[in-house]
Structure formats: C-alpha cells, structure tokens
Image (cartoon, grey):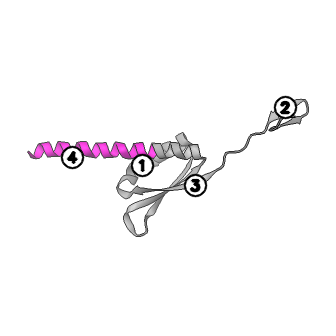
Amino acid sequence: FGAGHWKDGDKYQRRVREPKIITENIEIRAEYCGKVIGKGGENLKDIREQSGTRILISKEPVNGNEEIRLCSIEGTKDEIEVAKQLIDSNIMTEIEIRRRREHRQALKIT
C-alpha cells in the first residue's frame, strides 16, 4: 500500500490529517469594536460563519490602555486569515464612513 492509505475491506480510504486549530490574538482599537461586532452582534456572527472561526472580543482594555481591545480568533491558519480580512474590511468601511462624514461637516462650516 502507498503511504497515506490503508485497506478497509475492499475499499481504499485516504488518511486525512485534521487541520491544526490555533488561537491568534489581535488588537483592535476600541472605537472600532462596535463596527466589528455590529448591531446585536450581527457583523461578528457573519464573520464567524464566513470564516469558520470562533472569535471573542474582550471588553477589558489591553494593559490598561482604554483605546485597545484584545480579539482572540480560534481556527485553522487559513480560517484565521479570512476572519482577519473580514475584520479589517469592517474597520476600513467605518474609517471611510467617518472620513466622508468629517468631509461633509467641513464643507458646511466653510
């Protein structure tokens, strides 16, 4: 038999290695946590479902810094990368919304 195979009755089955589950912690500015979580947790739920990860965002500041929250993402390396991209996309959307709002306000002032 070739490597990675075994005989089960008359069937050959390929052994599959389970992907390694890891946890990665990232820091998120507290001002963007609301956007990442979404109303009623809807954005966070979508990120979890799309990436296949388990995500927890701490309510506590990191090392006493009120501006930073710790986000723990659990999954395979690939799943975590998808989750980080989705989180980044939510944050970038919020930054763009704020930038446009500030621009409109600046136009009203002048």
How many C-alpha atoms fall within 10 Å of the one at disc 4: few (<14), some, or many (≥20)? few
Looking at the picture, which amino acid does disc 3 mark? Thr
Give me the C-alpha separation between circle 3 and circle 1. Answer: 18 Å
Tag 1 secondary structure: helix
Give me the C-alpha separation between circle 3 and circle 2. Answer: 34 Å
Tag 2 secondary structure: strand
Looking at the image, is mark 3 or mark 1 nearer the viewer? 3
Looking at the image, is mark 4 or mark 3 nearer the viewer? 3
Tag 3 secondary structure: strand
| Pointers 1 and 4 in contact (C-beta within 8 Å) | no
Q: Residue 69 sits in which quadrant?
A: bottom left
**Earlier residue among tags 1 and 2:** 2
Which residue in the protein does label 4 denote? 102
Which residue in the protein does label 3 denote? 23
x and y percentages locating residue 86 in the rendered image: 46, 43
**Left or right for 2, reference 87:** right
Q: Is residue 97 visible?
A: yes
**Left or right for 103, reference 26:** left
**Earlier residue among tags 1 and 4:** 1
Give me the C-alpha separation between circle 1 and circle 2. Answer: 46 Å
x and y percentages locating residue 89 in the rendered image: 41, 42
- The tag on residue 12 is 2
Looking at the picture, which amino acid does disc 1 mark? Val
Image position of 10 with respect to 3: above or below: above
Looking at the picture, which amino acid does disc 2 mark? Tyr
**Earlier residue among tags 3 and 2:** 2
* Highlighted magenta segment, given as a residue range: 86-110
